[in-house]
Image (tube, rainbow, N blue to C red):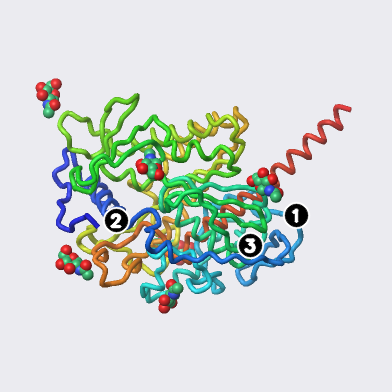
Amino acid sequence: MKYQANDQLPYGMKGQNNKSTKFVLIAVMSLVLFTTVPFYYPSVTYSSFIFTSFNSDHEPSPHTSSGPGEEYDPAATAIPTSSTHKCDIFSGEWVPNPDAPYYTNKTCWAIHEHQNCMKYGRPDSEFMKWKWKPDGCDLPVFNPAQFLELVRDKSLAFVGDSVGRNQMQSLICLLSRVEYPIDVSYTKDERFKRWKYTTYNFTMATFWTPHLVKGRDSDPNGGPTNTGLFSLYLDEFDDNWSTQVEDFDYILLSAGHWFYRPAVFYERSRLVGCHYCLLPNVTDLGMYYGYRRALRTTFRAITSLKNYKGITYLRTFAPSHFENGLWNEGGNCVRTRPFRSNETVLEGPNMEFYMTQVEEFRAAERVARKRGLKFRLLDTTQAMLLRPDGHPSRYGHWAHENVTLYNDCVHWCLPGPIDTWNDFLLEMLKTERLRSAEERLHSKDRKLLVR
Ligand SMILES: *[C@@H]1O[C@H](CO)[C@@H](O)[C@H](O)[C@H]1NC(C)=O
Ligand SMILES: *[C@@H]1O[C@H](CO)[C@@H](O)[C@H](O)[C@H]1NC(C)=O
Ligand SMILES: *[C@@H]1O[C@H](CO)[C@@H](O)[C@H](O)[C@H]1NC(C)=O
Ligand SMILES: *[C@@H]1O[C@H](CO)[C@@H](O)[C@H](O)[C@H]1NC(C)=O
Ligand SMILES: *[C@@H]1O[C@H](CO)[C@@H](O)[C@H](O)[C@H]1NC(C)=O
Ligand SMILES: *[C@@H]1O[C@H](CO)[C@@H](O)[C@H](O)[C@H]1NC(C)=O
């Protein structure tokens, strides 16, 4: 790891008040973390993954409203129903769930080393034993057979950063009770993986693009903290994914934390400004500027794909939880219980990132709708804000490894609260199925009326 612990903090940044100093510190902490924790599979650890594949006799099975005590029922009836149809599943509380987790690091091979918290000695396990309870309805426990049935003959692309990869690995683990995928990657590059669930003809892929737009790490040792200064072409598509996703049925976007890092911004091929580059005569436009424009470009990349007919999910910002100090003073996430919703509020950069996403999403959704495309918000922010206990902290690696200088309060232990993102995803797929059934029904009614 290139990063040196004694790198200076950007106290000297011009125009700082206390609030933004705090924000810059968070920025630098994240930046350090992202330098020390690779955002893609390190090939060493990845090669040790073994994806076994076995066929399942389970018949496809949709959900019955399973309470926390119930296992999923593979023999349940065939038509998805949804108890959450008219309820905001993203607003609620965490409640105890003695039956969780639904997999362990022994039953699932797909847990990335840095998120295998139990392996690296995390002493408490309570953080796995919670369930998201939306206000006014229940979110069913993940039903792997039902998920696979809903995505039969379909394909899902995770486009973005390692938090997206974190979710995908959670999904592989949750589905592993029914089937493991086989590796059908077309490149050896670990950042672009493709898996197939053969029984269900379901394909899943990851596209590594931490900033979503075209960019390059122009100077790995440059920038004010010597951790790399990115050049981001805010109005240009990242071909690495934009040319590859046209045939996918679902695109799931994940990005945010990387925009904390110093970067110079280009638009129409010209340098327009930067975020914390401290270069003479380059205007500091701030990270939200870069993030907003990158989102805009991403949505434009998707809506301009001629043959794309899929559903696009924007997974909203997942807050990090550094507390009690700077990144190099032991800033850490040591809580072992979730917050209740009245114990914390969304504020500061978490709020800014979230609002930027929502605003750009709403604007893009209108454009997409005219094109007949569905854009959906996978709105995980509130649920994750309440989970300071869900991060690897220092349990993402062995204690003797030098990277222990920094604590990971950005990614999520597996099993852990991030599993809930796939509960959300399944619920949204079911709602989608229900909606299209209703639409078909209504158009039939209309035809009957016309006659
Ligand atoms: C799983 O976690 C246990 C501790 O709960 C640890 O001893 C073991 O090495 C881990 N196994 C794997 C395969 O990661
Ligand atoms: C598998 O799914 C793809 C779409 O993702 C479809 O084109 C293909 O026909 C399916 N194969 C089989 C054998 O059903
Ligand atoms: C696209 O992928 C290649 C390697 O496969 C990499 O060198 C390049 O930087 C990537 N482009 C972007 C914009 O990330
Ligand atoms: C910055 O801009 C000023 C005024 O345009 C110019 O005199 C100066 O040389 C520039 N400095 C650098 C380092 O480009
Ligand atoms: C939050 O709500 C719970 C239950 O409604 C209550 O017991 C608790 O005292 C509240 N905490 C705060 C900090 O208001
Ligand atoms: C950890 O880093 C220190 C200082 O950078 C170095 O002296 C030491 O050898 C390193 N230890 C290991 C196990 O890499």
Q: Nearer the viewer, residue 179 or 356?
A: 179
Is residue 156 shown left or right of residue 334?
A: right
Amino acid type, residue under disc 3 in the picture: Asn
Is the C-beta separation of discs 1 and 3 under 8 Å?
no
- The quarter holding residue 393 reads bottom left
- How far, Cα to Cα, is label 2 from label 3? 34 Å
Residue 422 location in percent, x, y?
55, 56
Which of marks 2 and 1 precedes in the sequence?
Answer: 2
Secondary structure at badge 1 equals: loop
Is the C-beta separation of discs 2 and 3 under 8 Å?
no
* Residue pointed to by mark 1: 79
Amino acid type, residue under disc 2 in the picture: Leu
* Residue pointed to by mark 3: 143
Amino acid type, residue under disc 1 in the picture: Ile
- The relative height of residue 94 versus residue 32 in the rendered view (above or below) is below
Q: Which mark identifies residue 33?
A: 2
